[in-house]
Image: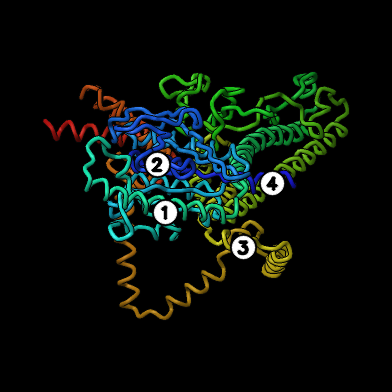
Amino acid sequence: MAAVTDSAKTEINVMIIGETGSGKSTLINYLTNLFHDGSLANLKIAIPTRYLKSNMTLVMPEHHEDCIDDITRRKTNQCTKYQYKIKEVYFNFFDTPGINDTGGYLADNENLDKIFQCIQSLEYLTSLVFVLNGTQARLTINIKNVLERFHERIPDIFYSNIIVILTNCTSHTVNFNSIKLLNNPPIYHMQNSAFSSDPQTWSEQTLKILQHDWNISIQTMNEFIKTLVLLKPIPTKSLSDINNDRNIIRSILHESRLMIMELQHIEDELIALEEASHIYSANIEKYIEENGTQTKSIQVNEITTTPYHNTLCLQCNIVCHERCSLSETTQVGEHVFRHCTVMNNGQCTMCPGQCTYNMHYHDRRLIKSVSRTLKTAISSLSNKYTEDKQHKDACDIKCKTIKETKHLLEQLLQDQFNKVHNACIRVQNNCQGFNIANELYTFINLLKNDTNLIRSTSIIHKVNKLIEKLEVLANDSSIILYEPSRATVTQQKKRTSKKANQIQVPTAIVDQTSHSQILDFSNNQRYAEYTTEELIDLTRQLIENHTLIEKELYHRCEGTSIGYLSSTELVTLCEYYTASYILEIDELLTLHSQLQQEIQELTVSDPYKILRAPIDKLIHLTAIKLCLQNVHKYQ
């Protein structure tokens, strides 16, 4: 523990984040001059500029700058550490790839992944420094996207260590007014003029102005360093813990889908044995002759933990690439999966249905389908019975045992949900920006699709019950405020149980309604206070809203509207649009007709059943629709 503390005291780690051309490299050059006693007459250049070559190669790392003459294009293409030392303290500044690169939205996401990987490689992080152009009045779309991604992935504790440096301005010329979006962090102003012009063109008057700006900027750097020294380093383990909990949520939900499939197999065995029990009563000899030596078994999915990460498919429930060589990511459907060796043009060559890359994720587990005999239910099926009564009694016992097995799996399913709930609480308590709804609804939609493949009505009921719980959890904002104590939960269970016994309502109904009893009562009382005219007006509004919602869902089924998209889904839309844009109009029309027909079949032409259609198909249809609109527009 002492070693960790010493490391935190002797190393100050700072991530420098900003748009391409915002002045991140200029900040590094200012710091180099501060630590190496540079001056306007003797500039120390760690990162070359358009007019100045690097002269600190012996003490600074080799730079990774491209396109120095073009300020609109990316320069730094990877995270580079610049280290300075004062006495026994090392100041490590990590210059990160620029945002708003000409590579576009996809390149921004890849650069963000590099930044997060760099952060996680450190033991402690002292500060996140955002370098922004102070001449702009507000945050650009690209920076907002970056902040949104950070808000979703970094612990809340990191926000107390954010610093903003506004470039190309002074405290009295700054035009930026969106600091409140960053929780009002410390702000410093920095003029880039000393590094943004050719020294050979400086006149005496220009030199005086530059010297004045230089003195102010160096003093600002001094204050900046003092602030860093006073900040309490944050262990990056908190970021790893959040990622682990995200992985736990995803893995447990995936396991739950596999368990539901096993429930279906067990249900089949139960029905078979119940039928057999009835047959034995009537004609025992015939059953023995036909089934004397059979051994019944079911397919189960065996899950094992591995020390390495693998690429898994959410849709097919298989491991598509064991020991994936890509850098491990915590996001489902990240663009990086396009580069996995099992992908071909964004589609998986290992999936039976050639699922798209955005249905894949990394997990340190393997899934293997194996054939197993139910230990307690059908372990003796190969040993057929000879006596009528003994045969029937034995079969009845097997049915009871299978029911016990089903009950056990149902309890395990509830335990799985509890684990997901607890993991969601942990993540949201550490990172309130974590999008639980987006994470859960990915699996909710898969579960809803699974119900189309399930034959048993009782299993469908269990799946729907799980879906309802997940939907409540996805929309429950209160879980970020507190975690109910064990005593409180126990009391709630006791009260619910007592209520159920008093009014003799089936447990399933009590479970479904107990959460909304108070709310429903309150709503009923509220409507009782309305006048008849007000109730009629309210009804008309509800009907109008219902019509508008139905119309919007209809548009989404047709691809003329898409609604809110996550960052991953937005990437998918961009890719489909790019791929469709080069097609001929006849090809577009054919593909449009094909997709629309598939969606109509999946939804049975009912817009309220849109969740049956994979989001990938809906996005693809929207992209084609956009291309067709543009074609007609230009024609």
The quarter holding residue 501 reads bottom right
Q: What residue is shown at x 70% (from left), y 28% (from top)?
A: 298
Residue behind mark 4: 6
Q: Is residue 105 above or below residue 342?
A: below
User: Which label sits on residue 176?
Assistant: none
Q: Earlier in the sequence, mark 3 or mark 2?
A: 2
User: Which label sits on residue 220?
Assistant: 1
Q: Is 438 in front, or is 115?
A: 115
Q: Earlier in the sequence, mark 3 or mark 4?
A: 4
Q: Amino acid at mark 4?
A: Asp
- Residue 586: give x, y in percent of width and height: 21, 22
Q: What residue is shown at x 40% (from left), y 55% (from top)?
A: 188
Which residue is the extreme one toward the left?
635
Residue behind mark 2: 24
Tell me the element at label 1.
helix
Q: Calculate the distance from the C-alpha at mark 3 to the C-alpha at mark 2.
A: 40 Å
Which callout, 1 or 4, points to the residue nearer the camera? 1
Residue behind mark 3: 482
Q: What residue is shown at x 42% (from left), y 48% (from top)?
A: 130
Which callout, 3 or 2, points to the residue nearer the camera? 2
Are discs 3 and 2 less than 8 Å apart at CB? Answer: no
Q: Earlier in the sequence, mark 1 or mark 2?
A: 2
Q: Is residue 70 above or below residue 215?
A: above
Tell me the element at label 2.
helix
Quarter of the image with the C terminus is: top left
- Residue 106: give x, y in percent of width and height: 38, 33
Q: Is 69 in front, or is 205?
A: 205
Q: Label 3: few (<14), some or many (≥20) within 10 Å? A: few
Tell me the element at label 3.
loop
Q: Amino acid at mark 2?
A: Lys
Q: Is residue 214 visible?
A: yes
Q: Amino acid at mark 3?
A: Tyr
